[in-house]
Image (cartoon, grey):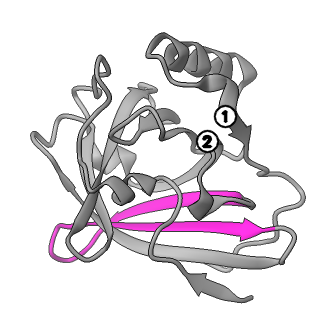
């Protein structure tokens, strides 16, 4: 399996802006528990960006490094080229560790905002934004998300003035090859 390292990758396109902010009117979740958030997440839908265009089978994996920095591994598969793309980054809390706001870097000193706007009590799904309404992701612990939950998250994003009509669906089904993790 061929892997290609990217400096910019899904979930953190906000690095282009160098801003660790949050969209006006949006609020990150409180009572955030990093230990429960760690692990693998599947990208269900996203706003499209050039750095992740044509990628499906996208996952983000979070773990703690030995120095207590959050390790981020983003991985996606280009179905047409039949190749994996991967990037490794690091994340830090912006303010309190109880608030779902982080700054993430995949390239040197440049950081982008990562804001958990909605989160299931069981940490099974999440709605995440970057620093502006140009970045939005619907994430799930499983490759499929219950349609009623998906609808609820899209409605919440629409209430926050995100362009939900522009969300693209991410293939997470049979077209995705087995991952060699």
Q: Secondary structure at mark 1?
A: strand
Q: In the figure, is residue 1 to the left or right of 66?
A: right
The residue sitting at the left extreme is 95
Q: Position of residue 134 (x, y in %)?
A: 48, 38
Give the position of the C terminus as an image quadrant: bottom right
Q: How many marks are shown on the rendered structure?
A: 2
- Part of the protein shown in magenta: 56-78
Q: Position of residue 171 (x, y in %)?
A: 79, 50
Numbered circle sitting on residue 41: none
Task: Identify the mark nearer the N-term, 1 or 2.
Answer: 2
Question: Residue at 42% across / 37% down in the picture?
Answer: 129
Marks 1 and 2 in Cβ contact (< 8 Å): yes
Q: CA distance from mark 1 to mark 2?
A: 5 Å
Give the position of the N terminus as an image quadrant: bottom right
Instruction: Say if 180 sits above or below 46 in the image.
Output: below
Depth check, front residue: 129 or 144 = 129
Q: Position of residue 92 (x, y in %)?
A: 19, 57
Depth check, front residue: 44 or 9 = 9
Q: Secondary structure at mark 2?
A: strand
Question: Per the image, is 113 magenta?
Answer: no
User: According to the image, label 1 marks what residue?
Assistant: 167
Instruction: Say if 27 sits above or below 52 in the image.
Output: above
Q: In the figure, is residue 95 to the left or right of 180?
A: left
Question: Residue at 45% across / 57% down in the picture?
Answer: 39
Question: Residue at 51% across / 15% down in the picture?
Answer: 156
Q: In the figure, is residue 42 to the left or right of 179?
A: left
User: According to the image, label 2 marks what residue?
Assistant: 46
Q: Position of residue 163 (x, y in %)?
A: 58, 25
């Amino acid at each position: 399996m061929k892997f290609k390292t990217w400096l910019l990758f899904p979930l953190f396109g906000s690095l282009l802006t160098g801003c660790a902010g949050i969209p006006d009117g949006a609020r990150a979740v409180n009572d955030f528990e990093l230990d429960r958030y760690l692990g693998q997440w599947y990208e269900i839908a996203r706003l499209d960006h050039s750095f992740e265009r044509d990628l499906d089978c996208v996952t983000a994996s979070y773990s703690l490094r030995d120095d207590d920095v959050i390790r981020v591994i983003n991985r996606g598969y280009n179905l047409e080229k039949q190749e994996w793309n991967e990037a490794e980054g690091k994340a830090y809390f912006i303010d309190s560790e109880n608030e779902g706001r982080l700054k993430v870097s995949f390239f040197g000193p440049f950081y982008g905002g990562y804001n958990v706007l909605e989160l299931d009590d069981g940490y099974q799904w999440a709605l995440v934004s970057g620093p502006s309404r140009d970045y939005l992701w619907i994430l799930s612990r499983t490759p499929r998300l219950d349609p009623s939950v998906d609808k609820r998250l899209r409605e919440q994003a629409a209430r926050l003035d995100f362009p939900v009509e522009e969300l693209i669906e991410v293939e997470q089904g049979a077209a995705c090859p087995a991952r060699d993790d």
